[in-house]
Amino acid sequence: MSELSGPNAIAEETAQLTERVALSNKHALELMIGSQQIVLEEMLFASNELLDRTRTETHLLAEFVSKLAGVHSVKGIQTMIQECAQHQLDFIRRDCDRLFRHGQRLIDASVSLVGQRWRN
């Protein structure tokens, strides 16, 4: 009779299988917790971004209205609109850069979360 067909071999194989299942469950739990943490961080980031964006847009509108109130000629209106448009474009560029960097960090965190599980 071969050594693999004995009761000790079956018990050892069962123990190894149980250990692999426990390790898989542990990795699945860590992945779920990590994913939940990333989702919660994203929700917090989105709410902060929405509040910041609203505050900034309100400030830009107030600045536009105050400049518009101070203009007394058509040439002044044209200059004011160019300045405000440039200011708005600069704001959009900075906002897009910030969102791009955040997206990069999110992708890195997600890849490291999944990559950690595959290495183990």
Image (spheres, helix red, strand yellow):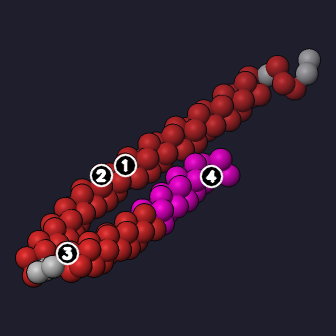
Residue type at numbered disc 2:
Met
For the residues carrying marks 4 and 2, which lies nearer the camera in this image? 2
Q: CA distance from mark 3 to mark 2?
A: 45 Å
State left or right for residue 113 relative to residue 47. right
- Report which residue position mark 3 lands on: 74
Earlier sequence position, callout 4 versus callout 2: 2
Say if 102 sits above or below 82 in the image.
above
Q: Which residues are magenta?
A: 98-120
x and y percentages locating residue 5 in the rendered image? 82, 19
Residue, x 21% and y 80% (percent of image)?
A: 76
Q: Nearer the viewer, mark 1 or mark 4?
A: 1
Name the element at disc 2: helix
**Do residues under tags 2 and 1 come within 8 Å of each other at their CB atoms?**
yes
Instruction: Using residue 5 as the reference point, say whether residue 75 is left or right of it.
Output: left
Whichever of callouts 1 and 4 sits on the residue coming sooner in the sequence is: 1
Q: Is residue 21 visible?
A: yes
Q: CA distance from mark 2 to mark 1?
A: 6 Å
Asked whether residue 55 appears in the rendered view, the answer is: no
